[in-house]
Amino acid sequence: MNNTTPTHRIIRYRLLTGPDDAGFCKRVSAALAEGWELYGSPSISVSGEKVMVAQAVIRREEQA
């Protein structure tokens, strides 16, 4: 019998949103540099001249 405590993975989720500009790209890049991973495809919404984007990111963390 194994006497070790099982390790569980906690998945943290964030949805980054904003206008489709360099600032949004920098925020996604910063999240990746902090250990977040892309989750799924980006989403784009257009309303008139306004273009909004969203990207989900996750972080897997080991928990005892």
Image (tube, rainbow, N blue to C red):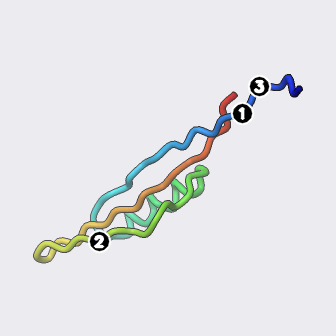
Q: What's the residue at 19%, 74% (across, down)? A: 46
Packing grade of label 2 (10 A; few <14, some 14-19, many >=20) is: some
Q: Which residue is situated farthest in the top direction here? A: 3
**On the image, numbered disc 1 is attached to which residue?**
7
Image position, residue 47 (x, y; %): 13, 72
Q: What's the residue at 32%, 57% (across, down)? A: 17
**On the image, numbered disc 2 is attached to which residue?**
44
**On the image, numbered disc 3 is attached to which residue?**
5
Image position, residue 32 (x, y; %): 56, 57
Dividing the picture into quadrants, the one containing residue 10 is top right
Q: Are marks 1 and 3 in contact (CB under 8 Å)?
A: yes
Q: In which quarter of the image is the N terminus?
A: top right
Disc 3 marks a residue whose amino acid type is: Thr
Q: What's the residue at 42%, 57% (across, down)? A: 56
Q: Is mark 1 on a helix, strand or loop?
A: loop
In this view of the protein, which residue sits in the foreground, 23 or 49? 49
